[in-house]
Amino acid sequence: MNRQEEQILFEKIKTGDEKAFEALFRHYYPHLCLYATRILKNDSTAEEIVQDLFVRLWEKRKKTEIETSVKHYLFRAVKNQCLNYIKHNKIKKDYSQKFLAETESAALNDNFETHTELFQKMEESIAELPEKRQEIFRLNRQEGLKYREIAEKLNISIKTVETQMGLAMKTLREKLRDFLVIF
Amino acid sequence: MKTKHSIEKPGWDLVAKYLAHETSAAEQEAVETWVAQSEQNRRELQEAKILLEKTDYFYKLKRFSSKSAWEKTQQRIRTEVGVILPQEKQRKLFISTFYKYAAILVLAFLVGVAGYYFGIRNQQNGIYSEIISAEKQVVNQYILPDGTVVALNSNSKLQFPKKFEYGVREVTISGEAFFDVVPDPGKPFIINAGNAQVKVLGTSFNVNAYPENETVEVVVETGKVQVVCSEKLNTQETAEILLNPGEKGILLNSPGKLEKTKNTDANYLAWKTHNLVFENTPLNEVVWQLNKTYHSDIQIKGEYIENLVLTAQFEKKPVDFILNVIQLTFGLHLEQENDMYILSENETLNK
């Protein structure tokens, strides 16, 4: 979704178009949740915060003016909600002020908004990997299985797991290098 | 042959292995020696590390299901809009069903309606709402912010936050209510009722906690419910019980004592459903149940009548229909004075 498409969508939302609202929701929901977990380290609270945000946005849709982009607005709102949550809730005692400051600056510096594009490209790149390689990579990264466990599960040698993991990384690195900016 | 200063770049398999913390000590050293060799090498490894971090985020993203989250959110945005209207409708329905005979009561009730739905401020968490049902008023359906459906018997009060805070859904009831709780494992539903705390994850059940009763009764319709005594007891007493469908938990307020029994009252939900079952029930008990269910004033005259037993089922029938059935079944005399019904022996027949 580019900026202009979002703008049009948001105009529709303002008139009470629930379908448009659903489209916006579905597009951003996982990304906003993931972003919230970066700050909160808790999946279900993250989901609640994002859902609350959308409910409020719907209630106040007529009065809401978006100056920047819809995407930026959503990410900023999630960030503010998460920081508010940390400040006002019980976890406060677990978080030192220093940590809060660090989290805040990390949330600001990490340009999470560009991740929507990165993840789209990643989805394609992973889907293009040979099936077996995809599976091995997923078992390691998503399910956190050890090489040995993957080898046992798929009835292959550990050496094969090593090679396949290396090849998967090599390919992904080539396809995604534009997004991997280091500073 | 390798020279001292140029260690070969490790292959991708070794880099991946290193970043997955799978390397042996020797392999680890090889990678770290290579990294230490130049700024360029350090960057390359860093880049690989970032790539893996991003793929991890990518997989995490898949944990959040837009579909189910949307269904929840959609229900919420629709409830926010719709909640007042159905309530109005229900109240009117109620008026037409129960108050068509009593103009004065209708007026009194309407005065009640004006103050029926109000919020009070709570210093800590913002705004709470209350629904209060009047003397002879039943609120058949009220939807809480999470979608949980509540029915409130007469003379009852339910207090709840306008928005449930994170991690828990907590309400306070005085009187009698039926709850159909929307399942949400991450967010238990807690009802404070007198000295009892009722905890659920998603189920339906009835709570009877009229302050004048000295007991709190919980009857489970579906699912599982935990009842906890929230007052400190002497340690010998049970502090919590788990109830299954068909079971009833009773908390005696003083001394705080929790008991579990089978629910034997088939009509425990009649106040809400208007479904009544009588099985060899003495007429005086039938009348007691009818008065409780319909907020009616029915009286019986004569010992002979009190001891008649009735076996019958009524589904959503008005009280005068039921009285007519009783009258015809037993050949009784039924008269009505204002709001009062009187059942008596049919003297003309007996003479």
Image (cartoon, rainbow, N blue to C red):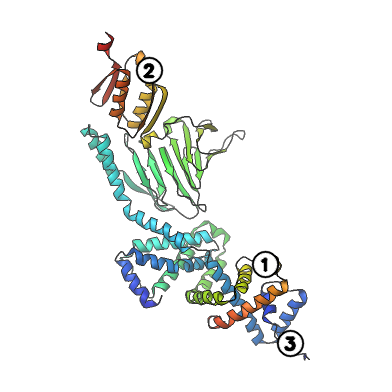
Q: Tag 2: Cα neighbours inside 10 Å, few (<14), some, or many (≥20)?
A: few
Report which residue position mark 1 lands on.
A154
Q: Tag 3: Cα neighbours inside 10 Å, few (<14), some, or many (≥20)?
A: some
Please give left or right for residue B59 compared with residue B210 in the image: right
> Residue B7's mark?
3
Report which residue position mark 2 lands on.
B308
Where residue B119 appears, as percent x and y from the top left, is 35, 48
How far is the residue under mark 2 from the one under mark 1? 76 Å
Q: What residue lies at 51% left-to-right and 59% top-to-bottom?
A: A44
Task: Tell me if label 3 and label 2 are in contact, CB under 8 Å.
Answer: no
Q: Which residue is nearer to you in this view: B126 or A75?
A: A75
Q: What residue lies at 34% left-to-right and 28% top-to-bottom?
A: B291
Q: What residue lies at 62% left-to-right and 77% top-to-bottom?
A: A168
Amino acid under disc 3: Ile
Indicate which label's residue lies in the foreground, 3 or 1.
Answer: 1
Please give left or right for residue B337 compared with residue B258 in the image: left
| Quadrant for the C terminus of chain B in the image | top left
